[in-house]
Image (cartoon, rainbow, N blue to C red):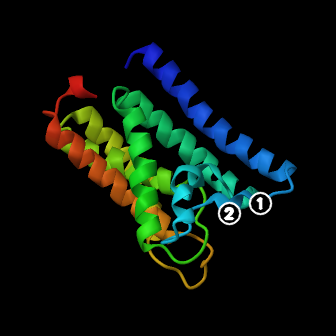
Amino acid sequence: MKKEILVKAFKTALVWVAIIWAVYLIDLLLPYNFNQFGIFPRKASGILGVFFSPFIHANFIHILSNTLPLFVLSLLLYSFYPKISWGVMILSILIGGLGVWLIGRSAFHVGASGLIYAIAAFLITAGFLAKSFKAMLLALFVIIAYGGLIWGMFPSVFRTYISWEGHLMGAAAGVLIAFAYFKKVKPSEENQ
């Protein structure tokens, strides 16, 4: 892997993390609750949250728990798939967010975890579709490091404040994006 790709990936991952923290700090400073800009399912006004929700976090624990996975997974995405990484991120936000808007509970859904699930699912799925040893090793690493994410895709009677719908739709978006990309492009190292 080229050093300049890794440096650029590191900087880009830092920017994603800096954005969510900047939004969180602005939300703390202003006498306004940004949660209302999250996704509110099946309401016309709630669809705007598709664009804003990944950047809004309900509290300190929420943003803290999303910071490291967002950084690590986006770093891996931008390092291993530099040509398509921006498209993966944008489509993950749009497809995952629209999925939440369609099936989510009647509540505001906020946070970067849907995007985190999308990136993880993309990296795992792409690892098997790309048919390269490097991509498969990356997929295996993501499974080992973040395999526990799977439990966040199911409803919980104990943690009703967590948007399992966001996690599920994010993961579905990541899988769909990987299949769409590798269906259109012949899998090879050059396409990454």
- Tell me the SS state at disc 1: loop
Front residue (pair 18, 100): 100
Q: Is residue 144 above or below residue 35?
A: above
Across and down, in percent, residue 186 comes to 13, 33
Residue closest to the far front: 44
Residue at the spot x=59%, y=51% of the render?
Answer: 52
Across and down, in percent, residue 91 comes to 39, 45
Residue 17 picture quarter: top right
Q: Quadrant of the N terminus?
A: top left
Task: Report whether 1 appears left or right of 18.
Answer: left
Residue at the spot x=61%, y=60% of the render?
Answer: 38
Alpha carbon of mark 1 to alpha carbon of mark 2: how far? Answer: 6 Å
Query: How many numbered marks appear?
Result: 2
Across and down, in percent, residue 129 comes to 19, 44
Q: Is there a contact, CB below 8 Å, between mark 1 and mark 2?
A: yes
Q: Is residue 91 above or below residue 13?
A: below
Would residue 18 be seen by someone viewing this image from the given angle?
yes
Q: What amino acid is labelled 1 in the image? A: Asn
What label sits on residue 91 in the rendered view?
none
Report which residue position mark 1 lands on. 33
- Tell me the SS state at disc 2: helix
Task: Report whether 149 appears left or right of 108.
Answer: left
Report which residue position mark 2 lands on. 36
Task: Report whether 144 appears left or right of 33.
Answer: left
